[in-house]
Image: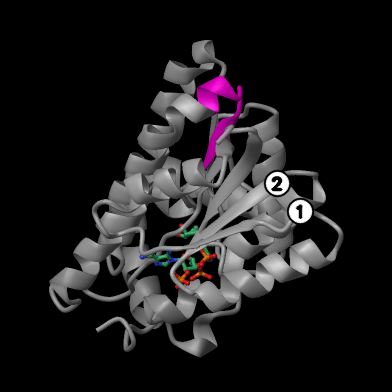
């Protein structure tokens, strides 16, 4: 079959920022493929987008932590005649709690998704991105800017994403591929519940970018070829603080903040 359907591939599209990315990319005229584990949610979103008169997105229900998932995804897209122009590497999760008390398999699972799957997808779809002169948007976080006691593996995973993305920005620019790291601050999504944060701590700081502003900043940054995008002034201030204030000052503060957020569901 001809690979003539150029798509934006969005991982983790069944809720939260991924679902908002899907709505935004569709509104900006992109054809889509949506990936996450919950098929019913992806179908509902595809119906919503298709019902608005746009092409119905391809839906591929997949656990991206399964080792051959990226290859399987590539095969399914090829069979559907789709070629990836934009990759939104969004699927990811965090776990709040002390490193020694959180289960090892759940923490390794975070690396499998946030680091391993993201890297594999970037590699598998790079030939498509190059052929289509497109790009990838990798979800880092302001958590990428400093180590995070009380959420140590998550912060480390996002530092990996930021470092990889910035390096690839430079490597791939001559090949016509844009790479942007998006560094959101706290946005209330399914993320906090999955991380095991106590509900009363969910309120983001005043003025912090919400979901819509966050995905718009990411989309616009990707299209403009920006290396790193931190949405909104509040997040930019938080990111600058984390990046520049010495760790001996920030580490105890972050440890106290994560402890206040609780960690029941994560255990
Ligand atoms: N929300 C925030 O405060 C915040 C801040 C900074 C960065 N981020 C980053 O933004 C990204 C999106 O987070 P979010 O806030 O939108 O979280 P969310 O609402 O929990 O959504 C996470 C998405 O990832 C999917 N997912 C989880 N495990 C998966 C797996 N094994 N295979 C495939 N898909 C999987 C989930 O779908 P299924 O459960 O259906 O698989 C869901 O669609 C993450 O990378 C996160 O680290 C979030």
Residue 221 position within the rendered picture, expressed as x and y whole percent measured from the top left: 67, 36
Query: In terms of sequence position, does the residue under pointer 2 or pointer 1 come before the other?
Result: 2
Residue 32 position within the rendered picture, expressed as x and y whole percent measured from the top left: 65, 50
Residue 148, picture quadrant: bottom left
Residue shown at the point (56%, 69%) measured from the top left? 14
Secondary structure, mark 2, is strand
Residue 229 position within the rendered picture, expressed as x and y whole percent measured from the top left: 60, 40
Residue 264 position within the rendered picture, expressed as x and y whole percent measured from the top left: 32, 89
The residue nearer to you, when weighing 14 against 158, is 14
Q: Is residue 2 positioned above or below 102 on the image?
A: above
Q: Residue furthest front?
A: 1
Callout 2 crowding tier (Cα within 10 Å): few <14, some 14–19, many ≥20: many
The residue nearer to you, when weighing 152 against 8, is 8
The residue nearer to you, when weighing 40 against 12, is 40
The residue that mark 1 highlights is 55
The residue that mark 2 highlights is 31
């Amino acid at each position: 079959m001809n690979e003539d359907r150029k798509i934006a591939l969005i991982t983790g599209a069944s809720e939260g920022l991924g679902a908002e990315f899907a709505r935004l990319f569709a509104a900006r005229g992109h054809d889509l493929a949506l990936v996450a584990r919950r098929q019913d949610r992806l179908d509902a979103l595809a119906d919503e987008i298709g019902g608005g008169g746009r092409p119905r997105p391809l839906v591929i229900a997949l656990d991206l932590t399964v080792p051959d998932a990226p290859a399987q995804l590539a095969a399914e897209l090829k069979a559907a005649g789709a070629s990836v122009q934009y990759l939104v590497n969004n699927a990811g999760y965090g776990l709040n709690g002390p490193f020694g008390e959180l289960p090892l398999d759940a923490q390794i699972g975070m690396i499998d998704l946030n680091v391993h799957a993201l890297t594999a997808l970037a590699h598998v779809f790079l030939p498509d991105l190059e052929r289509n002169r497109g790009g990838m948007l990798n979800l880092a976080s302001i958590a990428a800017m400093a180590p995070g006691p009380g959420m140590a593996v998550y912060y480390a995973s996002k530092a990996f994403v930021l470092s990889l993305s910035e390096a690839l920005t430079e490597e791939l620019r001559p090949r016509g591929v844009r790479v942007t790291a998006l560094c959101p601050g706290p946005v209330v999504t399914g993320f906090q519940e999955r991380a095991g944060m106590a509900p009363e701590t969910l309120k983001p700081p005043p003025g912090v970018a919400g979901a819509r502003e966050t995905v718009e900043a990411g989309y616009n940054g990707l299209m403009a070829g920006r290396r790193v995008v931190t949405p909104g002034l509040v997040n930019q201030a938080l990111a600058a603080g984390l990046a520049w204030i010495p760790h001996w000052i920030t580490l105890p503060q972050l440890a106290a903040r994560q402890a206040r957020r609780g960690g029941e569901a994560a255990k």
